[in-house]
Image (spheres, rainbow, N blue to C red):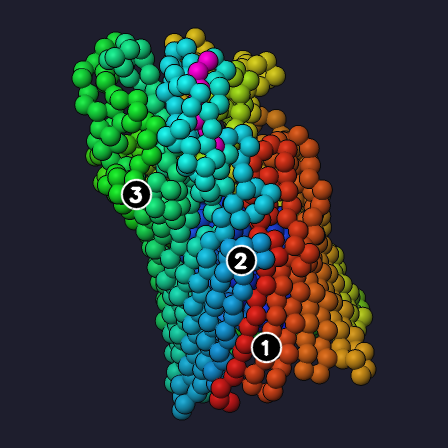
Amino acid sequence: MVTGSRIPRAQQEGPSPVTVISSEEIQNRGYRNVFEALQTQTQNTGMTQGEDYGNTWQPAANALNLRDLGPNHTLVLINGRRVADYPTAYGGSVNFTNLANIPAVMIDRIEILSGGASAIYGSDAIAGVVNIVLKKKFDGVDVNLRAGTTERGGGDNQRLQLVGGGATGDFEGLFGLQVEQRQPVWANQRGFMDSYPDGNNVGYRLNPQSGRYLGDASCAGLGGLFGGNVAPVPGARGGYRCMTDQYYNNYWTLQTKKENYDGYAGGTWHLSDSGKLFADLLFGFDHLQNNTRGPSFTSPDFINASSGDLERWYRLFSPEEIGGKSSNNSKWREVSWTGTLGYSDRVANTSWEYELAATRSEYRSDRTTRYTPAAGILDLYLGRKLGERDGYPVYDPDPARLGRPLSEEEWRSLRRNVTQHSESYSQTYSFTGNGELFDLPAGPVAFAGVLEVGKQGYRIRPDSQYNDGSLYNVSKASSSGGSRDRYAAGGEFSIPLHDTLLASAAGRWDQYRFSGRTEEQTTYNLGLEWRPLTSLLLRGSYGTSFRAPDLNYIYQADANGYYPAQKDYYGCEKGVDGACKNGRVDYVQSGTPDLKSERGRYWSYGFVWSPSSRFDFSADYYHIQIDDLLTTLDPDKLLRDEAACRSGGLDPDSAQCRDTLARVERNAGDASVDPNRLNKVYVNAINAAKERTSGIDLRSNIRWGAGDYGAFSSTLGYTLVLSHDYQQSDDYPSENQRDSLDSHDWRSKLNASLTWDYAQFTSTLFAVRYGSVTNAAGSGRLSPWTVFNASARYRLNERASVGLTVNNLLDQIKEDDSDGWPYYPTGNYDAMGRQWWLDFSYHFGG
């Protein structure tokens, strides 16, 4: 059975294109995991951020972004079944499936259906469907040991894979285990970003009214911190502050530290000639660590009793003070599992087959961060509060305290662990059946039907310390969560109209119940396959799709968070200190139960030409559109638009500017303290947007023999985005996302491979060419970039083999110095450079 249809078929190619990645390709092309195998596919034209892309929203997870329509518009299945969403939302907004913890050792193949498929699978299948098909049978036991590292430093890793299976009597069993450990990669391990020339404050006293620093031209007490790279820097309005260029690069993890313990167990009991009971369990235990930036202390504005002036104190803590940079790591402990129990059989003396199945999937993620108690840090630096004057607290602190480094013991006494618990679940009960209804002159009419009942939910429980006032300068956090019930019925027909013409039709009804509401959607799909020649297939499909509102959008309580690396464009224009750098921007987001489903339409047409078993070529055009798109404003675009509205670049009385300015909260321009300082942005969700994208996909496979020199095979894939338009609402103009400098996604992508099999030796060269993307400054485009991977494997005998894999063969990193540190396009590319692995495999048993 091929993804995109529940009707079994002998031919893989159907009315919609399906890309298949085999387990051999995953190994030979240098893919380290499932996510990397999918990320390099040409249909994946959208940027996402995850564990390999510096500090991001989801450092413990990886998401896919087919067609640049967002991670929530791609349906991810395992063995054709839904799994639990990652417990926390991508970018704080949308729900998605984590691809970081699926054991590669158990994968038989990955199938990617391009385009909508809600008429078959229901909600979420708008941009496409990814079905990860696990191994069904195995004879004997395979063991694989692998170790590797990055050439530029960091990222040492080891992996053990174990897979085995067999049969005894009426029972068949299968198991797999993958254990992996990886060290982090730090920014200071990459030469092009091992300093931060703009500098960071290490310590200062400031009069916030005048903007004058109160220190002198000496940082003697702090000079030994950050490797001795602390020096006084004069302020624009007088005085001095202590600064370093060794902050971000010391604390920023480019790649997480990670330990994975992932496994699978499954069994099938043959109860009769056709009836069988089956069960399987996929599980993962994952521990991760990452670092964003070092800890710091910013005092409240206070009146200094000795001077009578208003002051603000700041102190940045160095690795030497806190016991090493790793002591500041945030930590994730995650447990996930998906279990299925089912029975399948064939109706006697008919073509009809049916299956009853129940699937339960759960995901739990505990994030532990170290924060500073308010009482301890204020007492340490400011001492006892003496009272208040003019609305400000009064303290009489010792300035020498600010200039003295902390001991490791002092620091430990100031820190405590704070843990947020997040969990999600999904459960589905399904009945599916397929068979032949009746015969037409060209063949039998086939039918497949499905009935589903499901439920999904999530819950986020922040540590009580977030809200009890005991932590210093930490945003409050609210518990959130909820669930919804799902009911669905669908049918699919395969109709042979002629010996060379096959039509397909599918329809499905879905109902969601949540927050006292009922949301229903009916979707359909039509497909046509014409084979005028045995070597040629002409195909086309048209259908509708939908996505039920994200649970996070429905149930999210007021969420206070921050974007860690965002520029304040208007503040930069007005000279607000630090606004021109990529710094912290606070946001508020809350959910609403009044959201409705997004509605989509798609169509595609193309051909497949296969004149021989050694060559095939396909070309397809696709068009996908989404209406009533749920959206929150992109913070970068929001702040760019705000600057244009305030500065006259956009009409301040337009609907767009009125909405934009209402979403940005900042101090007044004539405020006595911190004029024009950005306080927060509001990014609530609404059903308002529209999105359209179209493009072409090209695929080719060639196989040929070379006589005594073995055999060769080659693949080529190419995707070109022809258009991508986005409209925030009817009051906003439509925007050309494909060519906009506000977009950081690829307009084209190409991948190619060449494999040589010779006697006991196999080698593969794999390349991915990424099209141009916008630079960090938004002022132009970065040139295309190509990455080469290579692998070689030698079979020592029938049971043993050794292999070498080298990723980023030319040791190139795509740098971008248009807007300062970190000097590379995070989210589009990584900064690992060349990586290599050695592995050894051995087969025991049959």
Please give the count of numbered marks on the rendered protein: 3
In front: 555, or 304?
304
Q: Main secondary structure of the magenta part?
A: strand
Q: CA distance from mark 3 to mark 2?
A: 39 Å
Give the amino acid type for the residue marked by disc 2 in the picture: Phe
- Mark 1 or mark 2: which comes first in sequence? 2
Residue 268 figure quarter:
bottom left
Residue highlighted by disc 1: 802
Which residue occupies 51% across, 89% down?
846
Q: Residue furthest bottom?
A: 169
Numbered disc 1: secondary structure: strand
Span of residues in magenta? 238-244
Instruction: Assess disc 3: are there few (<14), some (14-19) or many (≥20) residues with their C-alpha within 10 Å of its C-alpha.
Output: some
Residue highlighted by disc 3: 408
Side of 110 relative to 664 (left or right): right
Residue 240: within the magenta? Answer: yes
Q: Give the label on residue 541, or none.
A: none
Numbered disc 2: secondary structure: helix
Instruction: Assess disc 2: are there few (<14), some (14-19) or many (≥20) residues with their C-alpha within 10 Å of its C-alpha.
Output: some
